[in-house]
């Protein structure tokens, strides 16, 4: 048996983050466009050569992007907001980057996934690419949006590879997904309506590709795994019928990935395309539907290597799965591929010299996944040794005591109803907490972090390098914490935070102290543009060997009479920002993390913390792509929050924070979490987001953010008072807290100081206007 291997996309960033450094140097004016473009060209060439050398038969081109592939497409079809002043012809680099970052060059804020707008031309919005942690730039389309081919980027890529002697299959994002992901700048029209005007641009791209010698093109329509409207499904039919007619001899490999195509699969199977790629990792059952319903002649691309995770594949099991498929369709009609582009995994495991040998045998990054593909392509006879090695690794992982901890499993088994709810209902807890805490009306607080100044970063780096001792580092951090506490007291905040100076990152900090987590040195994946992240790897059962935050909390509280919040990251957020083991359900991994956090919550309470905040910044972003799957996810997400937060007495106030808004669709789940206080982001939407809380009659306390921390702007007292007035129209005074939208770590003290002083003044003004804590 030998099956053609195909790759759908390779990471662009370079194994040593070459693209990031080239971009940032260009943006800083330290190097010119030629230097940037040369780096990009070299990265593309290296990727092509690597894939060729690994023996991949079908190698993609145009999977590269300087910033983002959705932005590339918007630029290619001339969907450029008028403010950029673009008229016609190729979009120059500076316009392209202005669309990405705003024309003042203001950068994006990280954790919350929001673009912030500078003064000149604003950047496009940015949002999550399906359920990955990659963020794309949201194209803006008008009702009368003209489309035109500004430059044929897929063709350029195809020719560039051709010049190196490599025949590639160019990739392009499909028109339906592009339109669906775009945002309409006017109310009352659906961007998919623009299809008729967009298709001629694709037709031209395809015709030029064909003329240049391309035989196949990979068209990505990941929207195939979403809930689609009838209009969107009709748009798919229209698109592929039209393209098939205009450029009949360019074969289309239509790729639907990130899940099971489900009810869209019959639609996809009726499209007049030459090939269909299915994600058989996320949607393994699709293979049966494909076997029953694939029309004669359709080439099937089997996405069997996980493009979303870092685990070594069980090659033997995969081969066994495909034997009957090969028997049915024949080798010529099959391709074997990763489930999706490898964009979402790190590049090369070999760089991880710090990971232990055993763990490494369990992992495969993009480069190793190419090897896995090649082995699969050779089949069970052609690669006996490699397949046996993979099986040995799988067996060692399955049996490893590092992965399986009976104590953790026992604890999961003994979860009982009492661990899934607070002792008393909110009304009773509130009475007890109000009595104990004696907070003023409209209590003021912040979300946790204070500026991570260059000094803080420098000191952390020096400690990591061994240039300063642990004791010196600790002294430094204590100093920062102490001044933060003193300052918060001085300006009159009611509930203080220790400032999180000791934390490198809100997930990593905890992962490093929990069992079952591993960290890498070079395993970067693109989050957006030049911002990359190194997600932790959750490889085993999770437990907490010892308290993680208690000493920092104790120290901070020792400095003041005001309450200092304990500050933790929640289980769902830790899960959603990590690579998660694939041998246990995400729900169970989340429960394990929740129990570890529960221990920490209880220890904080024992140490005397009256308030403990458990951040669930990424809870909403973990929502499944299909509505039908939401309930199951929300159920275990809420259960996880209960597991971590209910080990405390009624008098202990549990806070949570979510750095977004749009709660309308999940307000039941938010209410079910039953946090005593929730702080959320609301300032930019002018409190509109509170409407969900109003119509639901959310009973617990809420701190709607009044200070947009994504912007360097310092809001004045009046502005915050106005926002609070809007909040008071929707919430009872006794429910309201006053705080910023999110943590302040990305801001400068020069911005934070006046903003928080103003926030406290706004609270005082409000208090003198109101009288009682209702
Ligand atoms: N406590 C964290 C902080 O203040 C929360 C960050 C977040 O929600 N992204 O930084
Ligand atoms: Zn936040």
Image (spheres, rainbow, N blue to C red):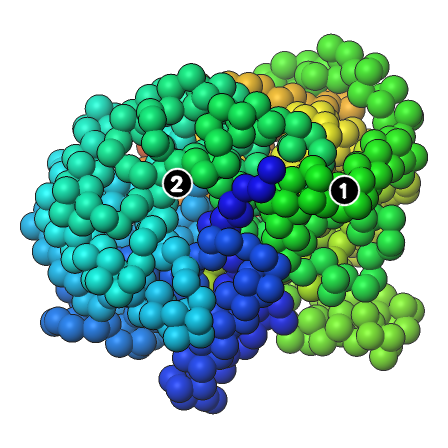
Residue 635 visible, this orientation: yes
567 or 530: nearer the viewer: 530
Rendered image quadrant of residue 602: top right
Q: Quadrant of residue 458?
A: bottom right
Under tag 2, what secondary structure? Answer: strand
State the residue at coordinates (74%, 62%). Answer: 350
| Residue under the image location 57 percent in, 37 percent down | 304
Indicate the position of residue 238 as horizontal and vertical percent values: 16, 35
Residue 445 position in % (x across, y down): 58, 47
Residue pictured at 53% horizontal, 47% vertical? 5
Coordinates of residue 681 in the picture (x, y in percent): 45, 44
Comparing 33 with 412, the one in front is 33
Q: Earlier in the sequence, mark 1 or mark 2?
A: 2
Is residue 694 shown to the viewer in this render?
A: no
Q: Nearer the viewer, mark 1 or mark 2?
A: 1
User: Residue at the location (33% across, 46% down)?
Assistant: 219
- The residue tagged 2 is 255
In the rendered image, residue 430, in percent from the top left (x then y), is placed at: 62, 23
Question: CA–CA distance between discs 1 and 2?
Answer: 30 Å
Residue nearest the observer in this picture, 575 or 339: 339
Count of labels shown?
Answer: 2
Are dots 1 and 2 in contact, CB under 8 Å?
Answer: no
Residue position for label 1: 384
Left or right of 399, for residue 371:
left
- Badge 2 crowding class, 10 Å Cα cut-off, few under 14, some 14 to 19, many 20 or more, is many
Q: Circle 1 sits in a helix, a strand or a loop, which is it?
A: helix
Q: Residues within 10 Å of mark 1 (few under 14, many from 20)?
A: few
């Amino acid at each position: 048996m030998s099956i053609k291997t195909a790759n759908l996309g390779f990471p662009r960033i370079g194994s040593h983050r070459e693209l990031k450094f080239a971009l940032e140097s260009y943006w800083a004016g330290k190097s010119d466009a030629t230097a940037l473009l040369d780096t990009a060209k070299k990265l593309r060439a290296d990727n092509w050569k690597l894939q060729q050398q690994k023996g991949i038969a079908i190698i993609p081109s145009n999977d590269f992007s300087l910033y983002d592939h959705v932005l590339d497409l918007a630029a290619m079809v001339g969907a450029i907001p008028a403010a950029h002043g673009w008229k016609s012809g190729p979009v120059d680099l500076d316009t392209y980057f202005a669309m990405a970052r705003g024309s003042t060059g203001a950068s994006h804020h990280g954790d919350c996934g929001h673009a912030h707008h500078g003064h000149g031309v604003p950047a496009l919005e940015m949002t999550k690419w399906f359920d990955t942690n990659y963020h794309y730039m949201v194209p803006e389309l008008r009702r009368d949006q003209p489309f035109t081919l500004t430059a044929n980027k897929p063709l350029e890529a195809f020719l560039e590879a051709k010049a190196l002697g490599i025949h590639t299959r160019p990739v392009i994002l499909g028109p339906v997904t592009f339109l669906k992901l775009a945002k309409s700048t006017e109310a009352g029209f659906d961007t998919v309506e623009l299809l008729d005007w967009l298709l001629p641009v694709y037709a031209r791209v395809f015709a030029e590709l064909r003329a240049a010698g391309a035989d196949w093109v990979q068209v990505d329509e990941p929207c195939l795994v979403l809930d689609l409207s009838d209009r969107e499904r009709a748009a798919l039919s229209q698109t592929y019928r039209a393209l098939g007619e205009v450029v009949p001899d360019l074969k289309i490999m239509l790729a639907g990935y990130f899940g099971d195509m489900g009810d869209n699969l019959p639609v996809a199977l009726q499209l007049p395309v030459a090939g269909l790629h299915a994600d058989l990792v996320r949607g393994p059952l699709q293979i049966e539907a494909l076997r029953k319903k694939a029309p004669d002649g359709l080439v099937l691309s089997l996405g069997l290597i996980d493009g979303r995770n870092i685990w070594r594949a069980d090659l033997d099991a995969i081969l066994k799965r495909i034997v009957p498929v090969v028997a049915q369709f024949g080798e010529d009609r099959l391709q074997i591929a990763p489930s999706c582009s490898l964009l979402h995994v790190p590049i090369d495991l070999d760089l991880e010299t710090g990971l232990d040998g055993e763990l490494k045998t369990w992992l495969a990054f993009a480069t190793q996944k190419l090897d896995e593909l090649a082995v699969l392509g050779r089949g069970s006879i052609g690669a006996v040794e490699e397949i046996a090695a993979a099986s040995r690794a799988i067996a060692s992982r399955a049996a490893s005591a590092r992965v399986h901890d009976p104590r953790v499993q026992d604890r999961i088994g003994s979860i009982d109803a009492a661990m899934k709810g607070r002792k008393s209902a909110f009304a009773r807890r509130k009475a007890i907490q109000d009595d104990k805490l004696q907070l003023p009306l409209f209590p003021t607080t912040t979300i946790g972090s204070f500026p991570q100044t260059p000094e803080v970063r420098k000191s952390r780096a020096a400690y990591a390098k061994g240039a300063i001792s642990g004791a010196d580092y600790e002294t430094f951090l204590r100093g920062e914490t102490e001044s933060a506490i003193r300052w918060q007291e001085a300006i009159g905040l009611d509930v203080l935070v220790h400032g999180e100076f000791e934390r490198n990152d809100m997930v990593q900090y905890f992962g490093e102290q929990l069992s079952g987590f591993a960290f890498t040195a070079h395993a970067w994946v693109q989050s957006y543009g030049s911002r990359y992240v190194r997600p932790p790897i959750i490889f085993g059962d999770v437990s907490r060997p010892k308290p993680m935050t208690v000493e920092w909390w104790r120290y901070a509280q020792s400095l003041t009479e005001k309450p200092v919040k304990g500050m933790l990251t929640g289980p769902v957020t830790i899960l959603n920002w990590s690579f998660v083991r694939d041998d246990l359900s995400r729900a169970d991994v989340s429960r394990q993390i929740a129990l570890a956090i529960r221990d920490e919550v209880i220890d904080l309470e024992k140490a005397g913390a009256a308030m403990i905040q458990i951040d669930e910044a990424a809870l909403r972003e973990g929502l499944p792509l299909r509505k039908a799957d939401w309930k199951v996810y929300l159920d275990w997400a809420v259960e996880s929050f209960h597991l971590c937060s209910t080990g405390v007495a009624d008098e202990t106030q549990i806070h949570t924070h979510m750095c977004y808004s749009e709660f309308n669709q999940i307000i039941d789940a938010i209410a079910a979490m039953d946090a005593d206080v929730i702080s959320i982001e609301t300032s930019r939407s002018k409190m509109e987001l509170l409407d969900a809380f109003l119509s639901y009659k959310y009973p617990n306390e809420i701190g709607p953010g009044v200070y947009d921390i994504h912007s360097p702007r310092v809001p004045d007292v009046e502005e915050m008072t106005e926002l609070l007035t809007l909040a008071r129209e929707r919430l009872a005074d006794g429910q309201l807290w006053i705080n910023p939208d999110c943590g302040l770590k990305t801001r400068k003290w020069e911005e934070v100081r006046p903003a928080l002083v103003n926030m406290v003044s706004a609270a005082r003004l409000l208090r003198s206007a109101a009288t009682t804590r209702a």
